[in-house]
Image (spheres, helix red, strand yellow):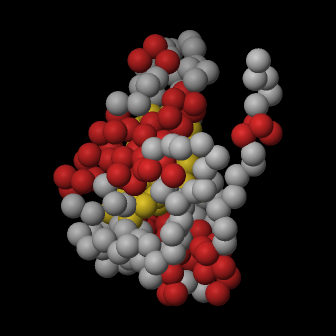
């Protein structure tokens, strides 16, 4: 696997020190369309997701993992919307993140989507640690994805993770390149704290 180093520093300018792997995480659109993630590294990234916390240890996170060139990858890519379809085909892997909703035959797990989100966050940070990049997508046709993979009503498609190796951003369209190079900004921490006694 060949890794391309960022040509522009994308590390966050944080107000307080945080782990470098967190500060360095960003969501590129420019992926190397020839890069292949070896199976050991991909398994490590998925293993990090497996060990995320979950309410009552119900572990509701489920994944559809599709490598570029596979029929599953093509199915996922076909459901992407707008700009996402223009660049995500260069990724090494597309992962559909699915929340398994039931606790049992009579109850739905109210924390299933939250726990899936935690698992995807773990996956994202492990990927960053491995020298990979991720981009989380909400722009996709969830019913079409569910139908394409035969998911039941008790399985909610929540997001798609684009996983791969950083590519040459100059290969992107001018509009996507502008987004790729725009400054990383976040609201001030004080604006996020509803109460801080």
Report x, y in % for residue 139: 64, 59
Which quadrant does the N terminus fall into? bottom left
Q: In front here: 171 or 189? A: 189
Tell me: 159 left or right of 95.
Answer: right
Which quadrant does the C terminus fall into? top right
- Identified at 75% across, 45% down, the residue is 188
Check the image and report above or below for 181 versus 64.
below
- Identified at 32% across, 47% down, the residue is 45
Tell me: 22 left or right of 64.
Answer: right
- Identified at 56% across, 20% down, the residue is 109
Report x, y in % for residue 22: 48, 48
Q: In front here: 77 or 37? A: 37
Report x, y in % for residue 133: 43, 61
Query: In this figure, what is the number of numbered marks?
Result: 0
- Identified at 35% across, 34% down, the residue is 50
Tell me: 156 left or right of 6.
Answer: right
* Occupied quadrant, residue 185: bottom right
Check the image and report above or below for 75 versus 99.
below
Q: In front here: 12 or 146? A: 12
Report x, y in % for residue 144: 57, 55
Check the image and report above or below for 184 versus 17.
below
Q: Is residue 31 visible?
A: no
Q: In front here: 150 or 155? A: 155
Tell me: 53 left or right of 185.
Answer: left
Q: Is residue 10 visible?
A: yes
């Amino acid at each position: 696997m060949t890794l391309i180093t960022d040509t522009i520093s994308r590390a966050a300018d944080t107000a307080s020190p945080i782990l470098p792997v967190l500060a360095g995480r960003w969501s590129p659109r420019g992926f190397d369309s020839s890069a292949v993630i070896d199976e050991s590294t991909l398994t490590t990234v998925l293993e990090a997701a497996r060990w995320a916390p979950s309410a009552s240890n119900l572990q509701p996170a489920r994944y559809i993992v599709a490598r570029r060139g596979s029929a599953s990858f093509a199915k996922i890519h076909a459901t992407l919307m707008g700009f996402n379809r223009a660049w995500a085909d260069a990724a090494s892997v597309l992962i559909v993140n699915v929340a398994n909703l039931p606790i049992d035959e009579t109850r739905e797990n109210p924390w299933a989507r939250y726990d899936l989100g935690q698992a995807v966050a773990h996956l994202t940070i492990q990927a960053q640690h491995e020298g990979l990049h991720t981009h989380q997508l909400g722009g996709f046709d969830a019913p079409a994805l569910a139908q394409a993979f035969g998911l039941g009503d008790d399985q909610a498609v929540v997001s798609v993770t684009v996983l791969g190796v950083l590519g040459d951003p100059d290969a992107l369209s001018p509009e996507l390149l502008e987004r790729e190079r725009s400054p990383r900004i976040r609201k001030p921490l004080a604006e996020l704290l509803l109460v801080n006694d």
